[in-house]
Every structure is written in C-alpha cells, then in structure tokens.
Amino acid sequence: MKDKILDQLKDAVIEMNFDDTEVLTKRALDLEIAAVDILNNSLVPALDEVGELFSEGEYFLPDVLLCVKAYENSYRLLEPNLKEGEYSTRGKIMLGTVAGDIHDIGKKILAALLQGNGFDIVDLGVDVSPEKFLEKAEEVNPDIIGMSAMLTTTMPAMKEVIDVFSEGGVRDKYKIIVGGAPLNKKYSDEIGADGYGEDAQSGVELVKSLLK
C-alpha cells in the first residue's frame, strides 16, 4: 500500500497533476510514511525523470514549470515534517540572475531540480549585483555559485561578478558556474567560470560532477 502511494505521487508530479499531488502527499503522511522517505522515493525520482524528459525533448519549458509547481506543492506539505539531521544534503548551491536581468524561469527550474536532488538552495533572486553575490557568498558559504543571464546585454555582468571575487581574494574559494540562453561554453571559459550548463538538467549534472 505504501509503495503504491509513493509510486502514484511520483507519477502525479510527472503528469503535472496538482490535485493528486497534494492529496497523495497528505495520504502518505496519514499513513505515517516518513517525510524524508516521501521526498527520496517520490519527489526526487520524479524531478530526475522530468529533467530527463526535458533533455530528450519530450517535455518543454511549460511542462517543466508545471512539474516544478506540483513538486513545490508537495514539498510545502512535507517541509514541516522534515526533521533537521534526518537527511543529509549533498551541498549548498547559491543561485542568482545577474545585474540588469530580471528573467528567472530557468533559474527556478534549476533550483527545483537541484533541491529535488538533495541540494540546499540559496536563491538570491534577479538583478543581483556583483557585490551582493560576494556578500551573500561570504555569509552562507556555498559549495557552488550559479549565475544566470538571459540577455546578451547582461552577459558581461557575469565577468564582473568573477572579477569582484578575484579582487576580494576569494575566487579560489568557490566554484562558479554560468547558464542562460545566450551563453555557450566558449564564453564561460573566456570569463573564467568553472563550468557551463546548457539547460537545467545539464546544470544539475554539472553540479554533481563538480562536487564529486
């Protein structure tokens, strides 16, 4: 019975079924399935599969956004029941969209996929200045910093962030990765980033590889 509920919840997230996602999450908790088990056996595998479907071209951006929303609805119900120390995170990732850019859809998808894969997320939001990236990094001490830009006009802000870290003498302390529609690996290499993610799923794989 419990395994069936977990499988149904996983399918509900993948199928973007908000109502079933909430009902099944509550039912699983009522059956006294541990929140961490629901997370690890339903939500994490669901987002893994969603990421694969997106990479394979079977799901498109609107589909992924709806899956992420379904995931968030379930996670919100689980969160009060997730006990500190009950599960270990795989690392802390700080994300932000660079100064002058207010696009955050891709960043939100990456954040959800990373969270579903067991990473702690610190999301700085959009239009984040280089100084803010540095200030928050020193405050929360992330394992990886991810920058997003969706406009060619805001791409130079990525180098400005890296320069600020270098000038502050802490560049080697952090892994810095970049992503966004106008970017490519060549640009990532040119500005001295530690990696480039072509899309959200490749961003997840990049993070995993950097933290091995």
Image: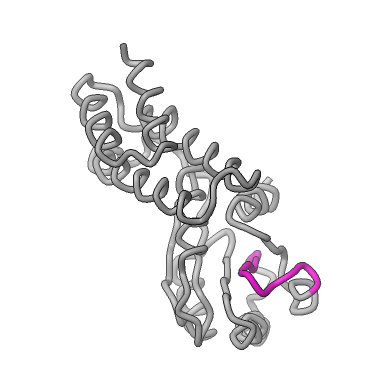
Residue 130, quarter of the rendered image: bottom right
Image spot of residue 100 (x, y percent): 50, 87
Asked whether the viewer can see residue 120, the reply is no
Residue sitting nearer the eye, 15 or 44: 15
Residue at left offset 66%, top offset 74% = 182
Image spot of residue 183 (x, y percent): 69, 72
Image spot of residue 181 (x, y percent): 63, 70
Q: Is residue 189 left or right of residue 41?
A: right
Colouring mode (rainbow / by chain / secondary structure / one colour): one colour
Asked whether the viewer can see residue 43, the reply is yes
Residue at left offset 69%, top offset 70% = 172
Q: Is residue 177 left or right of residue 24?
A: right
Residue sitting farthest toward the top: 1
Residue at left offset 30%, top offset 26% = 34
Task: Please say if 157 is above or below 64.
Answer: below
- Whether residue 100 is in magenta: the answer is no
Q: Is residue 109 left or right of residue 74?
A: right
Image spot of residue 153 (x, y percent): 61, 88
Residue sitting nearer the eye, 135 or 206: 206
Quarter the N terminus occupies:
top left
Residue at left offset 63%, top offset 67% = 179
Residue sitting nearer the eye, 88 or 158: 158
Quarter the C terminus occupies:
top right
Q: Is residue 189 left or right of residue 57?
A: right
Numbered range of the magenta stretch: 174-186
